[in-house]
Image: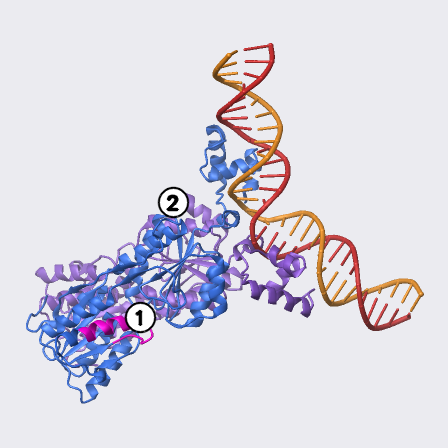
Chain colours: A purple, B blue, C orange, D red
Amino acid sequence: MTINDIARMAGVSKGTVSRVINNNPRGVSEETRQHILDIIERVGYVPNRMAGSITLARTKMLGLIIPDIQNMFFPQMVRGAEDCAMEHGYTLFLCNSDSNIQKEQQYLQAFIEKRVDGILINSCGERMEERLRRSIQKSNIPVVLLDRRSKDFPGAPGIFVDNEEGAYTGTCHLIDSGCTAICFLGGPEGVNTTAERFRGYRQALKESGISFRPEYVLYGSYSTLSGYERMKNILESELKIDGVFAGADIIAVGALRALRERQVSVPEEISVLGFDNIAISADLSPSLTTMAQPIYEIGYRAVSKLLAQIHRDPGCDRSEWMHTTLVLRESTQKGRGLK
Amino acid sequence: MTINDIARMAGVSKGTVSRVINNNPRGVSEETRQHILDIIERVGYVPNRMAGSITLARTKMLGLIIPDIQNMFFPQMVRGAEDCAMEHGYTLFLCNSDSNIQKEQQYLQAFIEKRVDGILINSCGERMEERLRRSIQKSNIPVVLLDRRSKDFPGAPGIFVDNEEGAYTGTCHLIDSGCTAICFLGGPEGVNTTAERFRGYRQALKESGISFRPEYVLYGSYSTLSGYERMKNILESELKIDGVFAGADIIAVGALRALRERQVSVPEEISVLGFDNIAISADLSPSLTTMAQPIYEIGYRAVSKLLAQIHRDPGCDRSEWMHTTLVLRESTQKGRGLK
DNA sequence: TCTCCAAACTAAACCGGTTTAGTTTATTCT
DNA sequence: AGAATAAACTAAACCGGTTTAGTTTGGAGA
């Protein structure tokens, strides 16, 4: 069932049918319009948009790459992205790179081959092949970065968070709560968010006159397991700490588990601070004090920005920085009980 | 940059270039092949697969609709689906219906318009418009159901879980642990998984000679909030319960929070059983005893089945049922401590 | 009544690929 | 040497749409 069939059945040319399909009222009478619509309705014809998109040179599809769909941070971001995309009639290709540069590249290649109108990426951090990078550049597909910077797209705008500021605020809160030996359980060392959060952490220590101890700093990945293992390492060492700055809420989840297994009470013996404010953080026991990111909005605005790029709106290549806010809960407030 | 440009630059016809692109060695000498590949590499040409797909009548795209990407159950399923799709060179359109039939329909419409090769759906449960249903049928796109049945696709095969068996096993475990007043915190009433789990729950009560009390049965949605609110309702009522069968782990998460806020100890005063075994369940405090579903595998096999349907393999329209297993943790085992 | 113009429509080119039918050239077989 | 065949390639049709350049028709204005 094609546009030709409809045209034949309606006794008109396919150009006329095309105009009806696309709600272009120019040059088609109301009577013909209804006649054609009736036939389309009756036979259940659905136009092949992929055929059209080859002439139009736009597919109304966007590609989105995230490193880990099981990290609850990302689904929330995806929701924002998806909502914005749908509001503007775009469909989102969501791809999960598994923090694996090979997969990331495969998906990017697929995006170019499918001629998506724009790409959103939260890169795993590793460098991609020069050949692919050039392909993307040549293809002229706009790219917007999501939450993380990327060495492969130095010029691309993005929606970022002021991680340094957030980590500074969070660490100050730990210090204000009486912590003096605070360890830093970071994500992957190669990712800018980790580095920025580390800078904020270090700055806060410095300003409070607490000496920085490199053995308190552990890197890993943005995962519960990583938080669990790093925390266990610390607890098994001779280090005496009284505070934990987790580079992400899911890291904190792992850390809390390790603390619980060792029967260390939180926050009485050790305070724990997260970063992100994912949905589960409020439901944990103890509930997690954390630096809240506007996660949904990051996704939403990233798509907005991407659409602006597609339409070449003014100012579309400026990045935006969002801010974090401290959300106080049980994991850092000694003697406060449930909240 | 199109296939024509490459053909011109290489001094050959576009048919020859097409054969090279598609690794079709018939009728093209190794010398010409290399020559063309060199040019493609040099100019960074990437073929437009959407153009090709109009002749080929296949897009190598699959559509997947889930109701809630923030319910951690689904991301894990998506991972399985994605892995299988990628292994076979397909790209997945992941769409989040937000348990909203309107969105679900919009996405399905987009799938037909984009001519995806197959559709996977975990339907929100409400009926869709007859018109769209007919379109899908006419389009001949194979549909595979994921975890939930759908009235709109009665003939479609799917990957399901034996929910009744699982709920029966789980409820028996609660009873074996000494519970005699077990409430049922279900998901949405209109979804078959909820109904099946209810049947298993009721059957277990019956066989143990525990009288069924309808006031112990509460429906809601598959969400933490629903679990929290329903649990609070029960705690604020005069009902004296000693066990909770939660229709999903995230429901259990909400229930645990409500219990904690009321300072009811789990499992000493009330045992809580979940269903799903999502990743976070092991990290909760108390960790959650639950009926584990092979979530990743459901997604993986669903795509397998869909590809089988696309290729019209024998047996491709038979549904498959997977089984659950009881995972013992702290939330139901009195006096066991950490595990 | 004739001209002009807008509206309604058609025919055909085009988008970037794939595929089929056919042509040229070199090689093998008798 | 001549016929048969295979390999390498081209030209053109085709896929299902969009768009442009023209054509037909009817009504208003002079």
- Element type at mark 2: loop
Relative depth, front residue between C27 and A339: C27
Query: Image quarter for residue B180?
Result: bottom left
Secondary structure predominantly adopted by residues drawn in magenta: helix
- The residue positioned 41% from the left and 53% from the top of the image is A153
- Element type at mark 1: helix
User: What percent of the width, then of the height, locates residue A169?
Assistant: 27, 71
Q: Amino acid at mark 2?
A: Glu
Mark 2 is surrounded, within 10 Å at the Cα level, by few (under 14), some (14 to 19) or many (20 or more) other residues, namely few
The chain letter for the residue carrying disc 2 is A
- The residue identified by callout 1 is B192
Relative depth, front residue between B170 and A135: B170
User: What percent of the width, then of the height, locates residue B136?
Assistant: 47, 61
- The residue identified by callout 2 is A129
The part of the chain drawn in magenta is B186-203
* Mark carried by residue A87: none
User: In the rendered image of this protein, does residue D3 appear above or below residue A71?
Assistant: above
Please name which of the two marks, 1 or 2, marks the residue nearer to the observer: 1
Say if the magenta span includes residue B193: yes
User: What percent of the width, then of the height, locates residue B213?
Assistant: 20, 83
Mark 1 is surrounded, within 10 Å at the Cα level, by few (under 14), some (14 to 19) or many (20 or more) other residues, namely some
User: What percent of the width, then of the height, locates residue B194?
Assistant: 28, 72
Would residue A156 be found to the left or right of residue B2 on screen? left
Say if the magenta span includes residue B295: no
The chain letter for the residue carrying disc 1 is B
Relative depth, front residue between A304 and B150: B150
- The residue positioned 57% from the left and 55% from the top of the image is A2
Marks 1, 2 in one chain: no
Q: Amino acid at mark 1?
A: Asn
| Residue A57 visible in the shown view | no
User: In the rendered image of this protein, does residue B163 appear above or below residue B180?
Assistant: above
